[in-house]
Image: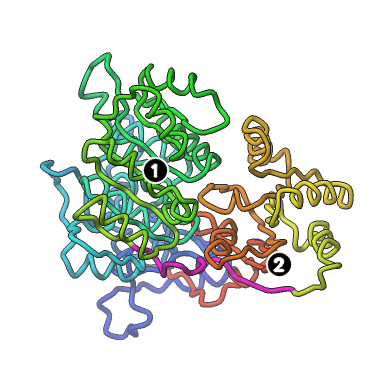
Amino acid sequence: MADGNEDNQCKSPMVSTDVNVSTADKIKERCTDQREALVGEPNCVMCGRYGEYICDETDDDICSLECKQALLSRSRVVNSQSLVGIQTPKILPATDECFYVRENSNSGSQSLTMDETESLRSKLEIQVRGELAVAPTLSFSSCNLPRRLLQNIDAAGYDMPTPVQMQAIPAALIGKSLLVSADTGSGKTASFLIPIVSHCANIRLERSSNQKNPLAMVLTPTRELCIQVEEHAKLLAKSLPFKTALVVGGDAMAGQRHRIEGGVELIIGTPGRLIDLLSKHDIELDDVKIFVLDEVDSMLQRGFRDQAMQIFQALSQPQVLMYSATISQEVVKMASTMAKDIVFISVGKPNRPSKAVKQVAIWVESKNKKQKLFDILVSKKHFMPPVVVYVGSRVGADLLSNAITVSTGMKALSIHGEKPMKERREIMRSFLVGEVPILVATGVLGRGVDLLAVRQVIVFDMPNSVKEYIHQIGRASRLGEEGAAVPRELVTSRYAAGSFSSGKGQKRRKHGC
């Protein structure tokens, strides 16, 4: 129901064919024509976009005639089933224009035309190079995923796919090899884990066998990223026949080998540790059909190219999914070596900061840097925990975390590569559950780690490269959340919230749709 006098004054019926209605005020026909909702604006009950109109029949917020029709259809189904005492199942959003299935499967839904597909990609800033007939999907329910996986996706809080997920997930589900580039924090991890979990669950449910060799492998450049990917995979695969093995340094290799030999669906590891394991033990990899390389540019910078290629050559022609926030010629060359018909998917403008990050520079003398940091952390206006502070050295991380605790009275911990794996895991757990509001980190957290709870990021020491800086400030805009970056001193999403939520460009919502 609409609140406020502004909405109640706009009850005159409107129809999209009225010749007296100006072009700017015409009712949106399709949900894809509507913009995303700003902070504080109503959301469409069907697709989540800006609820510009109010449906007279149900008094719900909607974004277009398409969503109104879907809403009324759902209401009729619910009413008819309640009359005969049938329990109504949860109905997922019905705004999709295409129902994506695996190759050689049947679909009862109408596909987008080529022009509609190109129009949608243009609006989402999705660029595709290579042979890819499948269009972006607008909801996870359109991807022919196992029911339990859909429930886990919903429970994890994924209301709608992000643009990279819209295109990469349906492409991966039909077996395409991909090289994907998107903003840091755009949801790349879920875009390869969802197809992996779906593939593995379907294989295990179709084949009853005691022999459970690995079906997929994810390669990442750091132990921390491996841990995050595994946690994410477990969340998506809850209650499904899906086990993981973490192959990283810091843990006993004997336990990792035993875990794999006991039967797992997914191996997640770093290149060096996987090479050690495979060279010393006979691990059956013939059933691995999906091979993911995450943060490919970071792997190349760390000198892991030969190791990654060696692992790839041990597999039996798998589907290759390569992900990176930045793309170089070396990355493209490596991708072309691994897969002949690889499809390039780019969302937004590669090698540039996320649009959701507002960058502001505050310059201070070096001797005053710490005090400026402390002022920000104790400021009710600027500090919104949990916060990550980036520094340039491991010693600096330890010293600064202690100084923050002493000067501000707030608990701060440091994390870097010299700390034992067990301690680093406990620090990450404490930070993610809210026990520790401030985390001082080196570049170990700059790449790939999905810290969705982070609300502020402080770049205390500027990194040496623009690419690394892009990764660091991306922590302030995980999955498209608004953020602000202040090089050398402050990056905080809430600090700039006013500039995003001031209501500029908002229109009155209209009754009579």
- The amino acid marked with disc number 2 is Arg
Q: In the drawing, what numbered circle is on residue 18? A: none
Q: Quadrant of the C terminus?
A: bottom left
- Relative horizontal placement of residue 104, taking residue 446 as reference (left or right): left
Of labels 1 and 2, earlier in sequence is 1
Which residue is labeled 2 in the image? Answer: 488
For label 1, the SS is: helix
Image spot of residue 422 (x, y percent): 64, 30
312, above or below 327, in the image: above
Image spot of residue 92 (x, y percent): 34, 44
Image point 24% across, 29% down: which residue?
286
Image point 74% across, 50% down: which residue?
397
Q: In the drawing, what numbered circle is on residue 307? A: 1
Q: From this viewpoint, which residue is outermost toward the top?
A: 210
- The answer to whether marks 1 and 2 mark residues whose Cβ atoms lie closer than 8 Å is no
208, above or below 195, in the image: above
342, above or below 9, in the image: above
Residue 376 visible in the picture = yes
- Total count of labels: 2
- Magenta range is 346-362
Image point 28% across, 35% down: which residue?
314
